[in-house]
Image (cartoon, rainbow, N blue to C red):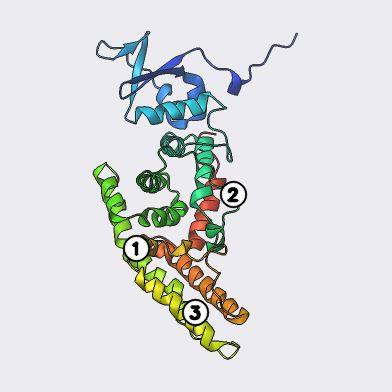
Amino acid sequence: MDEDTRVEHLWFSSDVLVLRAEKRLFRVPKSILAARSSVFRDMVAFPQPTDSETEMVDGSPVVVLHDSAAEVEMFLTAIFDSSYFMPPPAPVTPEAVLGILRLAHKYDVHYLQLRALQHLCIPLYFPSVREHCSPSIPDHHVYNGDTDKARCAYYIQAITVAKEAGALWLLPVSYYQASSYVRAHLLEAAEQGADKHVVDACLASQIHLSRASGSIYKFLSTPSDTGCPTPDLCNATRFDELSSYFDGCGGEEDLCPLSEWDEEDGWTLPLCAHCLSVAKTTHRTAMEEIWDRLPAIYGLPPWSELQSMKDTMMAAPSAAE
């Protein structure tokens, strides 16, 4: 009679691993965790110390993780509960996405890292300015305490975690979004522990965003050409709108050049059909120029290189496999 064959990758030992993060303890199947993570696989390959100085819980030595207890709980739950962290467009909290991405990268759990990046790409990566202004997929993140302060802190944290994970293609939009908030929110985030270098970069970029907002309105300062049948009326309309813009200069809207004059709200000016067409073309060109310059404002590679990085990283095989 033929002997039964063990399916090795589905033959788990009964051993458990006890992990400590801050004041929380977790007891999880050692072999399953090792199968998911090359870091934990290497960790459990070595005999665990059992001397008198080693902390023991239920007869097992405690492995201390120098990570946030809340993030470790979300990370381990995502590994052991397949329904907890589903692929997009399943709703997720920003805290879960960023915490799981940070630890999935640190402990080399490739499928969770990939899933977290897929979630983040929806609100933070767009192949063009047109898709940024009119995304085809709505943001599915469930924000707790959805205030300007909370959103600002989220974008700053997203920058920090994306850097740790090497996901540089997420940075231009993350930086842009964080930089669009008022100085007080950025400084408060720094006081609450946000990366000071990130906050400084956001503050330094605000002058560039403000200047870019001015270029968005170039179509208002361009006189009608010979194709306009009513130049006096169209020029007066543009002048009045330009005056209104200058009256409001220095406001928060000056920090959001890529969100101004969208198709629904911005094109109600009483211009002739020719001038309206020219205005839209001029505006679209200005938006594309700002979008193209966005990575450079934050010292990042151009969009083409960032896209290549994204393609490579999202397709990379797991080191744990």
Residues tagged 3 and 2 counted as in contact (Cβ below 8 A)? no
Residue linked to disc 1: 251
Within 10 angstroms of label 2, few (less than 14), some, or many (20 or more) residues? Answer: few
Residue 231 percent across, percent down from the top left:
54, 88
Q: Secondary structure at mark 1?
A: loop
- The answer, for residue 2, to whether it is visible in the render is yes
Q: Indicate the quadrant where residue 295 lies.
A: bottom left
Q: Which quadrant of the view contains residue 90?
A: top right
Q: Quadrant of residue 300 in the image? A: bottom left
Q: Are marks 3 and 1 in contact (CB under 8 Å)?
A: no
Q: Which numbered disc, 3 or 2, marks the residue that appears first in the sequence?
A: 2
Screen quadrant of the N terminus: top right
Amino acid type of the residue tagged 2 in the rendering: Ile
Mark 3 highlights which residue? 237
Q: Residue at x 42, y 76 (%)?
A: 242
Q: Residue at x 70, y 11 (%)?
A: 3
Q: Secondary structure at mark 3?
A: helix
